[in-house]
Each structure stands twice: as C-alpha cells, then as structure tokens.
C-alpha cells in the first residue's frame, strides 16, 4: 500500500501541549468540582485519582501504542491491526461518542462565551446569588442566545481545525496552555487568602467514605475517562501524529499528573470561595455559572476576575473540543479520502445540528425526554458513563491481549530498569486490572449487582 506522508506534531513541547490540552477542559474546571461537590469532596477525589493512575494511564498507553504504531485514524487503526470485523466497531463507537460529546460540550462552552461577554458588559443589577441564579436560568432556558453561542463556539473550532494539525492544533495549544496554567495559579493564590479557605480545603481534602456508593464509584470512573479523554480513540488519533522519539509512558504519566493537578487546583479555586460566600458545594452543573459570579461581584476588580475565569474556561474547552473533532476529521480524511476543509465542515456542521438540539433541551425542547433525560443529559450520560468505559475496556483488552507483544514493547521502549518495571506494571494493568475493574464498576453502577 502506498505510504502517504502523515502530519506530525513538530516538537516535544507541542506533544505535551496538545495532549494535556485535550485532557484539561470543562471536565476539570466545570464537571469535576460539581461532581466532587455532589459526592462528598475528598473521597470522590481519591477514587478519581486512583482510577486516573491505575486504569487511566494503562488505557492511555494502549491508545498511544495503537495510534503511533499504525499512524492511522481510529477506524483504520483497528482495521490494520485486526482481521476480525468486530474490533473495527471500536472505531465506530469512538467516532459516535466523540460527536455526542462535542455536541453537549459546545453548549457549556457557549455558556462560557456568554459569561465572557457579561463580564465585559457587566452583570447588570444582579449581585446576589438568587438574582444571578435567576439570570442564569433565564439565559440557559431561552432559545436564541445559548444556540447562538454554541454555533459561534463551534465556528471557532472550525477555524483552528481547518488550518491542520501542526499549524492549527499544535500552535494554538502552545500558546493557550501556558496561559491557562498562569491564570489557574493566579486564581489559586487568590482563593487561599479568602476567609473560607480552611473550610473549603477541608471539604476538598478530608475524605468521608460513607458517601461512597456504587453509583459514586461509576461516576468517579466516568469522570476519570472523560477527564483524560480516554475510551473513544482521541488519543489514538493524536498519537498517530507523534514522532518515534516521543516517549509514550512518560507522556501518559505527565498527562495524567497535570490533568489531576488542574482538577484539584480547580477545587482549590472554587470551594474556598463557595464556603466564604455561604454557597452550597453540591449546586450541580450550574455551580461555576451561578456561584462564582456572585463571588466575583463582591470582590475588588470583580469584573476582571470574572473575565479571567471565563476566559480560562473557554481556552480549556477549545483545546479539548478540537481534539474530539480530530477523531472524525482524521477518519473522514484518511479513510474516506475527503479534503481536510470538507471533513472539518462536515464534522462541525453535524455538531452544530446536534449542539442546537442540546442547547434547546434547557428551553423549548425541555419536554423531549428519553428515559426521563433531556437530550443534553442523555448525551452526557451515554457517552461518559457508557461509551467511554466500554470503549476503554475494549481498547485495553485489544492492546493487552491481541496486539503482538513485540509491538507493545517496541512502542513503550523502556530505556532503564525503572522504565522496564513501569512497563511491566502498565501491561499487567492493561491486561487484567483495567478490564476487570471497568466491567465490575460498570455493572455495579448500572445496578446489576
Ligand atoms: N478531557 C476533556 C475534559 O476534561 O474536558 C473532555 C474530552 C476531550 C473528552 C476529548 C473526550 C475527548 F475525546
């Protein structure tokens, strides 16, 4: 078969920026604090960390091995490596899940754009938590603005993605990721000086294991998969652009560590503020949109803090949605032979249609329920709690049991005794720990036992 020259990330720093850029997103700054808040804080966080390293890192290595070895999109990667048609379905699960996630995720990213706008224009007369709650509700349940922002956000994705892997994705991540870390650190320092800092940090770091139920365990695992962008082939696609010199185990460990760090820092930012201003940590998905503006409005230079925070959320969202889109764009281009611009337009166009439906599911489509869930909640639940864990389990079984051992060793390429020990541990987790844990947690969470 003729070998086409494939795009590659240009630098080692670029590889870290795009991978961490994919992992760090709304999952860390929006989803993680409200999940932790609703599930008792520290115990949830510990579980999440456990899943990130014991299951997340091995599954991430599995994705990296498959992606770099084949140098192909997720669908072609499985086709190249396996003769059976069944494994090819894993590719389709990933492509389907990525479009579902992109659709609901863009709605929340659109909310952040509305809040960037409001930070500049001012929140009007609303200062109290109740007034801001009503303001958020009025906005989210209206029809025009949430849809408009969802579409604008998706259009921003188009402009990054259409420029290609190196000139678009890598360059944008190289600039935005350091900015994101800088803004995070400024916020953390500020939060630590709030009067409620002690209470907030205790909530965040003092575990109450009585809160742990099978559903909480499933949520913590779903959160780990979501947060690390695992289970749908996003990192198979990205690693197909890695060079042979990229150390896979190191990149996986670094990504999991930085991703967990950002989630915890987001908690350090949010909970001291929540306790200082007497808010409820379990406020749910609206936590950052209702609680934080109330807090900002009380602070000196509140408008500037607010702008900075929502800018942070926007940056984090953009580098993540770009990585989700790349899954199907790579498939459209590599496998179906489309031009990059056409493939990007198709992906973004599809997300615009589904994203509009998700945005409207808070407003005029709120009565349209499937299994009692709105479209937004359905897309979130099906992708994070069902498709990602199942996809992750299949990917790790494939790399652990079906892939030639020589390929696994050649890709992980340990260069020291410590590296070899780490490789053995990762392969063990890939073969046994990850599949068994994922299946058990999955069935328990669904109430099977
Ligand atoms: N990891 C991203 C976040 O935490 O916001 C979400 C995500 C990105 C999920 C890419 C899946 C994906 F393929």
Image (tube, rainbow, N blue to C red):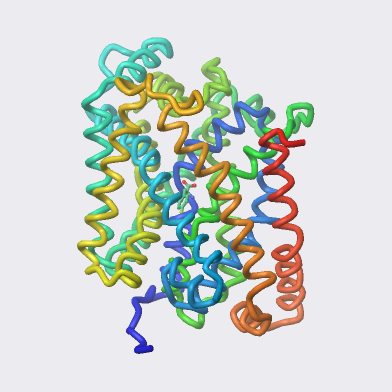
Residue occupying the far bottom of the picture? 2
Q: How many marks?
A: 0
In the rendered image, which quarter contains the N terminus? bottom left
The reply, left or right, for residue 408 in relation to residue 211 is left
Relative height, residue 21 to residue 422 (above, below): above
Residue at (77%, 74%) from the top-left corner?
421
Relative height, residue 268 to residue 436 (above, below): above
In the rendered image, which quarter contains the C terminus? top right
Whether residue 248 is visible: yes
Relative height, residue 289 to residue 172 (above, below): above
Foreground pick, 186 / 90: 90
Residue at (52%, 31%) from the top-left corner?
270
Q: Position of residue 318 (x, y in %)?
A: 35, 49
Foreground pick, 375 / 105: 375
Asked where in the image residue 196 lies, by quadrant, the reply is top right
Residue at (71%, 76%) from the top-left corner?
419
Q: Position of residue 10 (x, y in %)?
A: 37, 76
Whether residue 205 is visible: no
Q: Position of residue 229 (x, y in %)?
A: 51, 53
Q: Position of residue 2 (x, y in %)?
A: 35, 89
Relative height, residue 439 to residue 292 (above, below): below
The reply, left or right, for residue 225 in relation to residue 213 is left
């Amino acid at each position: 078969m003729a070998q086409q020259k494939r795009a590659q990330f240009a630098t080692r720093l670029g590889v870290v920026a795009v991978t961490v850029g994919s992992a760090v997103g709304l999952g860390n700054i929006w989803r993680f604090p409200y999940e932790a808040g609703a599930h008792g804080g520290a115990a949830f966080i510990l579980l999440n960390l456990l899943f990130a390293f014991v299951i997340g890192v091995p599954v991430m290595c599995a994705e990296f091995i498959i992606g770099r070895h084949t140098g192909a999109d997720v669908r072609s990667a499985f086709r190249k490596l396996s003769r059976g048609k069944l494994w090819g379905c894993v590719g389709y699960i990933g492509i389907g899940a990525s479009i579902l996630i992109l659709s609901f995720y863009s709605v929340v990213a659109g909310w952040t754009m509305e809040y960037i706008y409001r930070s500049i224009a001012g929140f009007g007369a609303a200062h109290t938590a109740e007034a801001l709650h009503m303001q958020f509700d009025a906005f989210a349940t209206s029809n025009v603005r949430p849809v408009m922002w969802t579409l604008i956000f998706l259009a921003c994705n188009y402009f990054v993605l259409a420029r290609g892997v190196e000139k678009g994705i890598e360059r944008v991540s190289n600039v935005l990721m350091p900015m994101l870390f800088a803004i995070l650190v400024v916020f953390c320092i500020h939060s630590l000086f709030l009067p409620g800092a002690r209470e907030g940090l205790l909530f965040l770091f003092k575990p109450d294991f009585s809160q742990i139920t099978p559903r909480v365990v499933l949520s913590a695992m779903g959160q780990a998969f979501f947060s690390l962008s695992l289970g749908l082939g996003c990192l198979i696609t990205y690693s197909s652009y890695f060079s042979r010199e990229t150390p896979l185990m190191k990149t996986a460990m670094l990504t999991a560590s930085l991703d967990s760090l950002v989630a915890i820092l987001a908690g350090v930012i949010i909970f001291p503020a929540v306790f200082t201003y007497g808010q409820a940590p379990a406020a749910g998905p609206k936590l950052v949109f209702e609680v934080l503006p109330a807090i900002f409005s009380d602070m000196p230079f509140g408008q500037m803090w607010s702008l900075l925070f929502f800018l942070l959320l926007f940056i984090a969202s953009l580098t993540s949605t770009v990585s989700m889109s790349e899954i199907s764009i790579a498939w459209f281009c590599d496998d179906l032979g489309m031009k990059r611009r056409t493939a990007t337009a198709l992906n973004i166009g599809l997300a615009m249609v589904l994203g509009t439906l998700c945005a409207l599911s808070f407003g005029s489509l709120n009565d349209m329920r499937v299994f009692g869930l709105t479209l937004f909640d359905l897309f979130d639940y099906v992708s994070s709690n069902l498709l990602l864990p199942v996809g992750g389990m299949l990917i790790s079984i494939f790399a652990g049991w079906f892939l030639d051992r020589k390929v696994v060793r050649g890709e992980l390429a340990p260069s020291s005794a410590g590296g070899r020990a780490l490789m053995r541990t990762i392969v063990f987790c890939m073969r046994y720990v990850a599949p068994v844990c994922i299946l058990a947690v999955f069935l328990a969470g669904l109430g099977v036992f």
